[in-house]
Amino acid sequence: MNDFSESTGIVPLQGEPVDDIRIFVREDAGRLRFNNVPPDPTSAQGRNDVIPGRGDLRISLTSACNLRCSYCHNEGQEAPWLHAKTSAMLGNIEKLLEIASRHGVKSVKFSGGDPGVYPGFFMLMDAVAGWRQRYPGIAKWGMCTNGVPFVDADTVFTGEKLRTLNVVRAARRLGVNVSVVEINGVMGTVHTVRSKFLELIAEAAEEFRLEPRRYKPLNEIYLYDKRGNTPIKFYQDHCRDLDCGNCRKIHLRVSPIDQGWGAVPCFLRAQSKTIPLMVDGKFDDARFEDAIKYNGQGSQWFKDTPYDPSY
Ligand code: SF4
């Protein structure tokens, strides 16, 4: 197991500004520890016309899923098995990309439910090929999936204890990058798994000969290779520490709703409270800028705004 006791410098990542970065993961009385940074309320007071941070737009394609994970946050919607299934229309996704492009989107991540059960998945993949040309500002396209629809389930899930490490191994065999999320207690069960999460980071770093460092702009631990690439990233539970200022810079989240699309400013603690982005079937720039403004403002983001459901 790695000893992460040394403070280490960090190389620039993906052109994003980095400075004075140190890692605070260390052996302490036999337990690994990660010191999360305190919330930074001022970081949520930036411009509203540009998606902040890494400019990531996280698009829920469908509320449907093939699993029933206890820790599912379903992008701020009700759990998939409680929710009437809604799926995004391909044309609406394109309109969403248009307005997001006007607001500086740099990457798109498709999520769900699970993208693998989205009925139009292969049409979507064909469309992405064209969108790469049409939206050159979007440099990265990805998806967040449990993997089951795409790989042999037996390859990924060989045992409960090693399940996550086996997903990492499957991704490395396929040559794709992988991110691991510390699970959140959002559906009634609070998980206290940080020490296990840190052990997993240490084991993955050792197995794949990568170096764990804290990426300060988002307060997360990534594993670096010698060229400064980050094939494996670990995202600790930002909600647990109310690290909302960093949450704001991680994703702008949108889900299909009855009125077309809704932004989800706090997807874990204020579930199902959204900002409808379409008015009379058309995207509204003022609503999109409100989505940026309120994103990552915590569980009470809607108080004293026109989006407060109690009004
Ligand atoms: S804004 Fe909501 S989802 Fe984001 S860290 Fe804060 S409490 Fe969690």
Image (cartoon, rainbow, N blue to C red):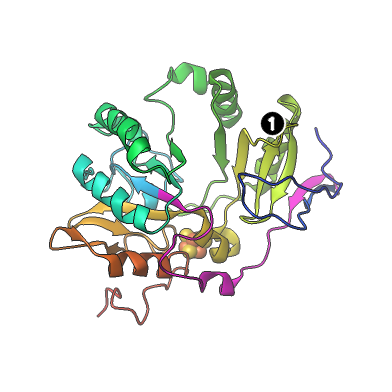
Ligand 1 within 8 Å of the CB at mark 1: no
Which residue is labeled 1 in the image?
Answer: 204
Q: Quadrant of the C terminus?
A: bottom left
Horizontal and vertical percent position of residue 25: 77, 48
Horizontal side of residue 91 vs 222, given as left or right:
left
Q: For the point 27% across and 77% down, which residue is it?
A: 310
Closer-to-camera residue (287/203) = 287
Horizontal and vertical percent position of residue 8: 82, 47
Horizontal and vertical percent position of residue 279: 17, 64
Which image quarter: residue 271? bottom left
Q: Is residue 26 magenta?
A: no
Name the main secondary structure of what is drawn in magenta.
Answer: loop
Horizontal side of residue 116 vs 35, given as left or right:
left
Closer-to-camera residue (231/194) = 231
Horizontal and vertical percent position of residue 107: 45, 45
Residue 111 visible (yes or no):
yes
Closer-to-camera residue (219/164) = 219
- Label 1 crowding class (10 Å Cα cut-off): few <14, some 14-19, many 20+? many
Q: For the point 65% across and 55% down, which residue is it?
A: 17
Q: Quadrant of the N terminus?
A: top right
Q: Is residue 50 magenta?
A: yes
Mark 1 belongs to which amino acid? Ala
Horizontal side of residue 14 vs 295, given as left or right:
right
Which image quarter: residue 144? top left
Query: Range of the magenta residues?
Result: 29-57
Residue 89 visible (yes or no):
no
Q: Is residue 212 above or below residue 160?
A: below
Label 1: state its secondary structure. Answer: helix
Q: Is residue 135 above or below residue 43?
A: above
Q: For the point 69% across and 31% down, which residue is it?
A: 204
